[in-house]
Image (cartoon, rainbow, N blue to C red):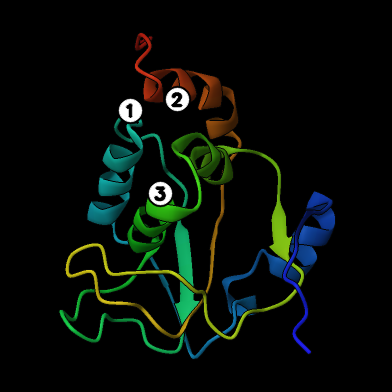
Amino acid sequence: MTRQRETVEVDPVLFRAVYDSPAALPGAHRWTTCEHDVRRIEKLLNMPPRSIGAPLWVSGDTPDCPKCGRRVNWLDIVSSALSAVHDRDMIATVILGDRKYVNTEVPDAIAGVYCVDCRTRIEGLRSFKCHNWAYAFEALEEVRERMAGGPVTA
């Protein structure tokens, strides 16, 4: 019998105790999304440049795409999610927002992720998270407005 996965909001103290450390991520390897790909995520989400400043962590059993060799990261996850699951605003809120979420069941592998460059299905990606920082919270509404095509404030 397979349990249904559920994501729930948790208290920040509990989040830090259980999930804040990258060492808590499942899988054989843990790595961060490279700077170049973080900037590509911002473009994909139509965010102002340099909106994302926190490390975007990924973990899994195989860090690289089996076909093109590119390091798999949040760019692949965001690109895949936009094509089938989530909208830009929801993803921006997860990355920049101040609420903390955890999955109640650790997946064997995250389903539905494809390499952003060669579209190969990615197997063995186990978890992803970000350490969002307080400076981004105040700018979240401005980022959302920009993503929707509104004016950019200095």
Find residue 68 and report its horizontal and vertical position in percent.
15, 79
Find residue 119 and report its horizontal and vertical position in percent.
23, 69
Real-space Cα distance between discs 3 and 2?
A: 17 Å
Location of mark 3 (residue): 82
Classify residue 133 as left or right of residue 145: right
Q: Nearer the viewer, residue 114 or 18?
A: 114
Badge 1: residue crowd in 10 Å (few <14, some 14–19, many ≥20): some
Classify residue 109 as left or right of residue 102: left
Q: Residue at x 33, y 69 (%)?
A: 114
Which of pointers 3 and 1 lies earlier in the amino acid sequence? Answer: 1
Q: Nearer the viewer, mark 3 or mark 1?
A: 3
Location of mark 1 (residue): 48
Under circle 2, the secondary element is helix
Location of mark 2 (residue): 143
Real-space Cα distance between discs 2 and 1?
A: 7 Å
Q: Residue at x 84, y 51 (%)?
A: 11
Find residue 26 and report its horizontal and vertical position in percent.
59, 82
